[in-house]
Image (tube, grey):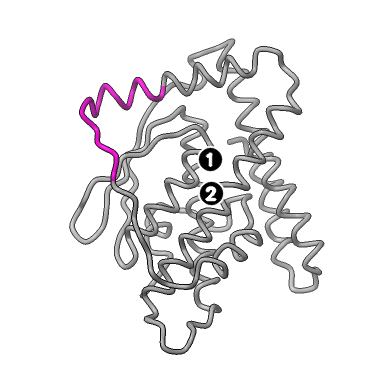
Amino acid sequence: MSEAMLSKVRKLLAQAEDPACTPAESAAFMAKATELIARYGVDRALLAAREPATDPVGDRVVEVVAPYARDKAGLLAAVADPLRCRCVRRRQGAGFAMHLFGFASDLERVELLFTSLLVQAAHGLAGAAVPAGEHPAAFRRTWLAGFAYVVAERLRAAEAGAVAEAGAPSMALVLADRSDRVQRRLAEVYPRLRTAPIRRLAGTGFGSGAEAGRRADLGGTGVTGRAAATRGIGG
């Protein structure tokens, strides 16, 4: 991502976090940052359609560590899917190695957003009161599930808006081709991949987490570094 784009996103993030901002002003700054990230993805896809070497299909591994490793992995998947990346979860010690597949520009967007969202989730969890009599871990897992669900919905909406704004007649075909190429790359590496069973959670934190997801900034560059991303949520 260009330094000019990163600079714009950082400024929006700083404005959104300013205590003097009203909730409406903060939400507006967050929406603009999300729009910039989505527009960047569309621009890179159109450029790569003309010059494929500028944005190759690739993969990378992100380590997700305990505690709440499965929930952090779920957040990563919730970010990756709307940004046209795919991920495979592999057990690694007490955590997971998440193998991501996608175009270089989309993988970059996923890691930037995931890093920031883990920190935002940690802050949100720290301020969320666990109901009396409920196990804290159960509440936190459902809180993170709600957070991830809403983040994914917001990212899908931002991506759809960027595609519509681009107005390129061939955009749908370009994105479909990119998704197919990513899926083929994944299938080459994991030809016998199995889908994990649906996870059932018992806590009551989903609604609170979903509300935090609606407030989360999706501009993505508040924290840098892969190690910070995987340690963002403590026990």
Task: Kindly indicate the quadrant of the structure image that contains residue 41.
Answer: top right
Pick the residue in front: 5 or 160.
160
Judged left or right of residue 155, residue 202 is left
Q: Image point 46% across, 63% down: which residue?
A: 144
Q: Are marks 1 and 2 in contact (CB under 8 Å)?
A: yes
Q: Residue furthest top?
A: 50
Q: Image point 52% across, 82% down: which residue?
A: 129
User: Label 2, on which residue?
Assistant: 113
Quarter holding the C terminus is: bottom left
Task: Kindly indicate the quadrant of the structure image that contains residue 168.
Answer: top right
Percent x, y for residue 229? 42, 57
- In the displayed structure, 178 sits above or below 24; it is above
Percent x, y for residue 175? 56, 21
Q: How far is disc 1 from disc 2 in space, using C-alphas?
A: 6 Å
Q: Secondary structure at mark 2?
A: helix
Judged left or right of residue 112, residue 101 is left
- In the displayed structure, 1 sits above or below 8; it is above
Other-residue count near label 2 (Cα within 10 Å), few / some / many at <14 / 14–19 / ≥20: many
User: Label 1, on which residue?
Assistant: 109
Q: Residue furthest bottom?
A: 132
Q: Image point 31% across, 40% down: which residue?
A: 88
Percent x, y for residue 182? 41, 24
- In the displayed structure, 31 sits above or below 102; it is below
Q: Amino acid at mark 1?
A: Arg
Percent x, y for residue 170? 65, 12
State the extent of the magenta-drawn residues as a range.
182-196
Residue 185 lies in the magenta stretch: yes
Judged left or right of residue 41, residue 225 is left
Other-residue count near label 1 (Cα within 10 Å), few / some / many at <14 / 14–19 / ≥20: many
Judged left or right of residue 100, residue 167 is right
Q: Amino acid at mark 2?
A: Leu
